[in-house]
């Protein structure tokens, strides 16, 4: 389900309007010509023109502000296309969903070993879309998936290329890893397989990655295995990779590497393992920096804050999200409660683009925590009858996707 969060004091132009505003604003080349030729625009000198352009841009856009005194509205609803083909019951269930970096689409993973991509309607980011009728639960799907990829085996993880843009088809790709298969790089416009990245074990057999993530520049693909990380060059598919053991010094994480996250600022990455351990490494040479203990269950997700100073970790059947200050990792900074201590499903969390709120799923509700200095309070949860797997904000904050559902045993 795609929801719209109500906001205060926001004006976000549609994609087409934003393009027109950028075209109408004075370009860098024009300003340089004006400076070289000594010409003056309407505002006077070239610096004055730059100031006018900056002021116009600031007036045209104000940062969104989340508002929780009003309930969110259900903008789009998808259910029928995820149901089992042999039964009308909810035998199939969602395992994850991720926004594309440009905010034009989102990608889902479900228990039928399929990845589905949904493009948002062209008017999804317009102000008029806020006044559309709310999607009904139990009704027909708002629209169908733009493409579907069948992996054949359970999907372990998937991720978008970080610089994906629908305006540049060459960047419209996402990677996935599934049981007994190499890492696949899929074309998000044609659903064709672009290439594969293969890792082999000591018996020269393909071994599947359990987690994958592009680095911040999109040049490397990091893959988590049992007690090891393998790094692939995105531009060189095949079986060439660098392998790093995580047991250096005997203090690194053991077991399956379940999650990888890159710091947006300082060239570090964090890995979480099912051994209840999180470790932080230098991206360049995989030098171990910190090893963090404290999760009650196996670590299922690690995520850096927007400024790169804090690291958030969540675990399986662990009701707390832990916050670590990577500048001083002696103690846990604080804990955020969520209801997931009796479910086996992987419940994930996300931080909205402005970095002020953390959203998390739960067994019966979706919760959001505001970051206000060191004072934290839980905003009134949105309750559901099923497990809410993820609360993820879109890159432009307007729509959020909250997939929900439990495994319901049924026979065909």
Image (cartoon, rainbow, N blue to C red):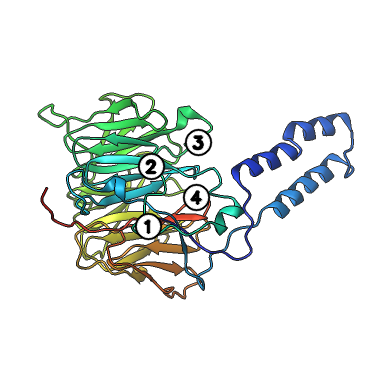
Question: Mark 1 = which residue?
Answer: 402
Q: Residues within 10 Å of mark 2 (few under 14, many from 20)?
A: some
Q: Are marks 4 and 3 in contact (CB under 8 Å)?
A: no
Residue for point 37% across, 57% down: 402
Structural distance between the alpha carbons of marks 1 and 4: 15 Å
Q: How many marks?
A: 4
Residue found at the very far front of the displayed protein: 139
Q: Which mark is residue 395?
A: 4
Q: Position of residue 93 (x, y in %)?
A: 24, 52
Q: Is residue 392 above or below residue 228?
A: below
Secondary element at tag 1: loop
Structural distance between the alpha carbons of marks 4 and 3: 12 Å
Depth order, front residue of 337/16: 16
Question: Mark 2 = which residue?
Answer: 144
Q: Nearer the viewer, mark 2 or mark 1?
A: 2
Q: Residues within 10 Å of mark 4 (few under 14, many from 20)?
A: some
Secondary element at tag 2: loop
Q: Which mark is residue 165?
A: 3
Structural distance between the alpha carbons of marks 2 and 1: 17 Å
Q: Nearer the viewer, mark 4 or mark 2?
A: 2
Q: Position of residue 18 (x, y in %)?
A: 65, 43
Q: Nearer the viewer, mark 1 or mark 3?
A: 1
Between disc 4 and disc 2, whose residue precedes? 2
Q: Are marks 2 and 3 in contact (CB under 8 Å)?
A: no
Q: Are marks 4 and 2 in contact (CB under 8 Å)?
A: no
Residue for point 31% across, 58% down: 404
Q: Are marks 1 and 3 in contact (CB under 8 Å)?
A: no
The reply to whether residue 53 is visible in this rendering is: yes
Residue for point 50% across, 42% down: 102
Structural distance between the alpha carbons of marks 1 and 3: 23 Å
């Amino acid at each position: 389900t795609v929801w719209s969060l109500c906001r205060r004091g926001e004006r976000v132009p549609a994609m087409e309007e934003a393009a027109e505003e950028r075209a109408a604003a004075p370009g860098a080349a024009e300003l340089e010509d004006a400076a070289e030729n000594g010409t003056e625009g309407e505002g006077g000198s070239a610096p004055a023109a730059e100031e006018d352009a900056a002021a116009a841009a600031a007036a045209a856009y104000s940062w969104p502000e989340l508002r929780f005194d009003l309930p969110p509205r259900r903008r789009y609803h998808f259910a029928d296309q995820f149901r089992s083909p042999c039964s009308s019951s909810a035998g199939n269930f969602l395992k994850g969903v991720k926004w594309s970096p440009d905010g034009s689409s989102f990608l889902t993973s479900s228990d039928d070993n399929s990845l589905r991509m949904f493009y948002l309607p062209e008017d999804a980011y317009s102000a008029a879309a806020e006044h559309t009728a709310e999607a009904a639960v139990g009704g027909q799907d708002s629209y169908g998936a733009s493409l579907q990829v069948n992996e054949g085996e359970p999907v372990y993880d998937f991720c978008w290329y970080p610089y994906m843009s629908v305006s540049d088809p060459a960047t419209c790709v996402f990677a996935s890893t599934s049981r007994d298969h190499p890492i696949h790089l899929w074309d998000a416009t044609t659903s064709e397989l672009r290439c594969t990245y293969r890792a082999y074990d000591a018996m020269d057999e393909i071994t599947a990655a359990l987690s994958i993530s592009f680095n911040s520049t999109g040049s490397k693909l990091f893959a988590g295995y049992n007690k090891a990380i393998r790094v692939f060059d995105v531009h060189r598919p095949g079986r060439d990779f660098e392998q790093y053991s995580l047991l250096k010094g005997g203090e690194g994480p053991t077991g399956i590497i379940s999650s990888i996250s890159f710091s947006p600022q300082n060239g570090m990455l964090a890995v979480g393992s099912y051994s209840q351990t999180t470790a932080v490494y230098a991206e360049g040479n995989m030098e171990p920096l910190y090893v963090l203990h404290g999760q009650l269950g196996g670590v299922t997700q690690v995520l850096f804050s927007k400024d790169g100073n804090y690291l958030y970790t969540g675990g399986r059947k662990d009701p707390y999200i832990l916050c670590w200050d990577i500048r001083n990792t002696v103690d846990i900074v604080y804990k955020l409660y969520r209801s997931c201590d009796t479910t086996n499903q992987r419940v994930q969390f996300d931080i909205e683009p402005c970095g002020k709120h953390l959203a998390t799923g739960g067994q019966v509700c979706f919760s959001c925590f505001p970051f206000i200095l060191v004072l934290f309070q839980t905003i009134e949860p949105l309750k559901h009858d099923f497990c809410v797997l993820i609360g993820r904000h879109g890159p432009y904050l307007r729509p959020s996707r909250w997939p929900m559902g439990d495994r319901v045993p049924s026979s065909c």
